Amino acid sequence: MERNKLPSFSLTEETSLSDLRIVLLGGRWTGKSSAGDTILGREEFESGKRTVQCVKRQGEVAGRQFTVVDTPGWWDHFSIKGSADLLKQEIMSSVSLCPPGPHAFLIVINADSSFEEKHRKSMEEHLHQLLGEGVWRHSILLFISGNHLGEKPMKQHSETERKALQWVKEKCGNRYHDLCNKNRDDVTQVTELLEKIEEMVVGNGGREFHLETKVLQELEEKRKMIEERVTQRDVKVQKQREKLRDLLKELRIVLLGWMGGGKSSSGNTILGRQVFRVWRSATQCMKSQGEVAGRQVTVVDTPGWWKFIPADFTPDRIKQEIVNSLNVCPPGPHAILLVIRVDTAFKEEERIILRDNMKRLGRRVWRHTIVLFTWGECLRGTSIEHHIESEGKALQWVIEKCENRYHVFNNEDMEDRRQVTELLEKIEEMEAINSVFHLSAETHRDEMETDSSEDHLSTDTPKDPELKPEHPFSQEGRQQEPTPYK
């Protein structure tokens, strides 16, 4: 039978539906939101912007009432371990947004991009671990492209890509459809998709998809717990902000973090102009100055360490440059901004690597450190507190080490100067309690040693092997002090 020439059929009275409920799933930038607009025949979702929360829209299509839920996309080439807990919760919650449950999941793939084994594995992990094996019985593979593809989704890819696509196609019961988001006037492509959805629903006896009651209860309990902890954290932050002292006329800031975290972009946002090079790995410290909100501000950008590689393997020149950054703005920085992306996972592995790289600056560095979350635009309507509480103990450990100091930047909106002035105020509050941070020849070796009560997430967490990195100012094996920045 020719494709798109399906026989006519109708739902029986037993399986008659007052409306069809659809959930869109897939990786980031696959075109899920645009597909939702195409199905509903109008602009309902914010296409071109990353979805960070589930969004539900309703409408009438071909005489039938429809509910469409758009979901946040995962990084389609990363394991589920790399997805933030908040994203996982949102995907699971999508089922509850269209009670009593969705009739169909449309698994969206960008047909114009590659689809390799890593993409297939990422998809399998996210769907299976979050929604269970039963999700496939309610799924249709939806190819999205700028042009109609006909049978091309399978033919235009390499052999290895075709194998990966074939696996997904078979898991979906060989149900798939192609949709051209640039041709929304072609209602045929939508009505044919709806026919395939109805046919699948008939095959499932009209039953919608359900998550186990226990899973939904646990999800709701977790949400309530997070809400309570968000309130507690907010109260704690407000109390700390009441410690504000006299404002400074000059502020010196050093940016630290892993490569690709957004340090350079954050430096540009603070200074309000393009000073530091973005998307190019820095190899040495760079300093720039300017007037910001009536203050003289010095910003030092530093080379980043690798996110997934232990600190032992951080190149010596990078380690040295990180220590040198403190000499770039004498007599020392008022604040260390520890830059962490909000759109990726932060688990125990990342915590240990971050901790070990920070150890070179001594234990006192945490007294002068604020966590700066970047890619804040990905949060949209979600509070940063929700992200902190959802992500878990590893990220919370970092926040607590910084005495509950954190801030969020949207580096895509450099014109939003309020986010900068609020950061400077937080730095001033911190400086009112602490003095300027610097390393000196008088730094005692015990400053470098780790307090085991602070170094681990809890007494139940197995202790990591003690790392004793060589410090340029230690009394034993003392090296020549680093050359100041020129």
Image (cartoon, rainbow, N blue to C red):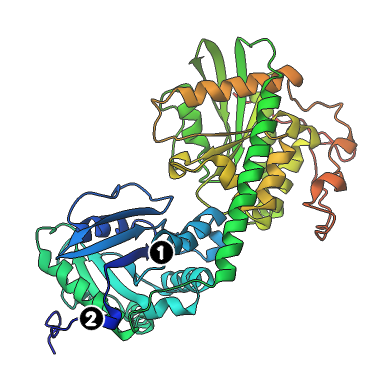
Q: Residue at x 61, y 29 (%)?
A: 254
Marker disc for residue 11: 2
Numbered disc 1: secondary structure: loop
Examine the rendered structure and indicate whether residue 87 appears above or below residue 440.
below
Estimate the x, y position of residue 371 in percent, counting from the top left.
62, 36
Residue 434, image x, y percentages:
76, 21
Q: Residues within 10 Å of mark 2 (few under 14, many from 20)?
A: some
Identified by mark 2, the residue type is Leu
What whole-number distance in Å separates the C-alpha atoms at marks 1 and 2? Answer: 20 Å
What residue is drawn where x is 82% and y is 44%? Answer: 454
Please tell me whether residue 279 is drawn above or below residue 99 in the rendered image. Answer: above
From the viewer's side, name the closer residue of 115 and 34.
34
The quadrant of the rendering that contains the C terminus is: top right
Mark 1 neighbour class, 10 Å CA radius: few under 14, some 14 to 19, many 20 or more: few
Residue 362: x and y in percent read: 79, 36
Q: Which residue is mark 1?
A: 99
Left/right of residue 469 with respect to residue 379 in the rendered view? right
Position above or below: 440 against 170: above
Indicate the amino acid at tag 1.
Answer: Pro
Q: Closer to the camera, 129 or 98? A: 98
Residue 395 % position (x, y): 65, 48
Residue 189 visible in the snapshot? yes
Residue 109 visible within the image: no
Decide which of 423, 204 is in the foreground and name it.
Answer: 204
Q: Residue at x 56, y 56 (%)?
A: 85
